[in-house]
Image (spheres, rainbow, N blue to C red):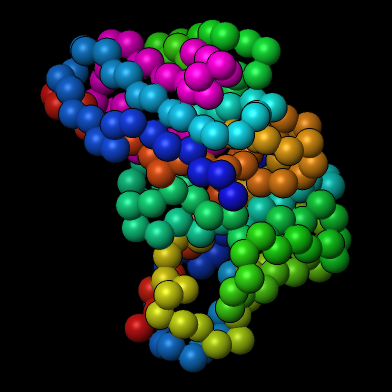
């Protein structure tokens, strides 16, 4: 199956700075989703952007989608130590009940 | 509200032993259910999904099997574990067409 690719694989920034993570994919999609995973825990859904949307906001999160470039970015503004986690993009490319296709994730570390 | 449970939380099993991991969902009916495996430092690999009782779709041929004996119960099994079966197993559910998924806390399986 087509796997998404996040970039960078790891990111370390100071608290208060903005963090940007990117995701690329190869197939056409219905929607793209971002998830967060704290160490050793399950994934938590953050935000979903549909293929006909270009930008979406949720609190300190901003997601963009460029279907022509087959890429998406997740921006976390004013980062906090609690934002330290792995972030995964996932996309739905079929119309059925198939599971999502996940990228390998970006590990984000917020330095206090 | 909906909740999803997985047990056990951790499991250490010898090679060749059987496996049974259980996932249950509360607060919803007729969910789509998914089993994923996450290897260390990697993204999620979809193993099985189910759209109803007794209906199982397999994504990757391997040493594992799944069953759905009840509407909100999903079981992952193996008759004989391999070393390569070690990993973090996550169960998820969804109901919407957009496949926004809600994950359980996961089971850490170590095969020795």
Residue A35 visible here: no
Q: Residue furthest bottom?
A: B16
Q: Is residue B4 left or right of residue A9?
A: right
Asked whether residue A80 is drawn in magenta, I would say yes
Residue B37 is situated, as x and y percent measured from the top left of the image, at 51, 59
When the figure is inspected, residue B110 is found, relative to residue A44, above or below; the finding is below
When the figure is inspected, residue B35 is found, relative to residue A68, above or below; the finding is below
The number of callouts visible is 0
Residue A30 is situated, as x and y percent measured from the top left of the image, at 69, 27
Residue A51 is situated, as x and y percent measured from the top left of the image, at 65, 19
Q: Residue at x 32, y 19 (%)?
A: A20
Q: Residue at x 45, y 12 (%)?
A: A62
When the figure is inspected, residue A62 is found, relative to residue B112, above or below; the finding is above
Q: Which residues are magenta?
A: A64-90
Residue A96 visible here: yes
Q: Residue at x 33, y 11 (%)?
A: A77
Residue A92 is situated, as x and y percent measured from the top left of the image, at 65, 35
Q: Is residue A26 left or right of residue B33?
A: left
Q: Return the residue nearer the eye: A66 or B85.
A: A66
Which of the 4 quarters of the picture holds residue A78?
A: top left
Q: Residue at x 81, y 68 (%)?
A: B69
Image quadrant occupied by the C terminus of chain A: top left
Asked whether residue B10 is drawn in magenta, I would say no
Which of the 4 quarters of the picture holds residue A108?
A: top left
Which of the 4 quarters of the picture holds residue B94?
A: top right
């Amino acid at each position: 199956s087509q796997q998404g690719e996040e970039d960078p694989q790891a990111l370390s920034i100071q608290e208060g700075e903005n963090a940007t993570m990117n995701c690329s994919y190869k197939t056409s999609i219905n929607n793209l989703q971002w998830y967060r995973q704290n160490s050793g825990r399950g994934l938590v859904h953050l935000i979903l952007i549909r293929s006909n949307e270009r930008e979406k906001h949720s609190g300190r999160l901003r997601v963009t989608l460029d279907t022509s470039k087959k890429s998406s970015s997740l921006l976390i503004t004013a980062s906090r130590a609690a934002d330290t986690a792995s972030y995964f993009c996932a996309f739905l490319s079929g119309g059925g009940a198939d599971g999502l296709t996940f990228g390998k994730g970006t590990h984000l570390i917020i330095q206090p | 509200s909906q909740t999803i449970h997985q047990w056990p939380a951790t499991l250490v099993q010898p090679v060749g032993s059987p496996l049974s991991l259980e996932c249950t969902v509360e607060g919803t009916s007729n969910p789509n259910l998914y089993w994923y495996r996450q290897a260390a430092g990697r993204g999620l690999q979809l193993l099985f999904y189910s759209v109803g009782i007794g209906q199982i779709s397999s994504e990757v041929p391997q040493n594992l099997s799944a069953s759905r004996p009840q509407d909100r119960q999903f079981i992952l099994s193996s008759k004989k574990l391999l070393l390569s079966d070690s990993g973090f197993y996550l169960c998820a559910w969804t109901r919407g067409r957009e496949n926004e998924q809600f994950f359980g806390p996961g089971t850490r399986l170590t095969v020795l």
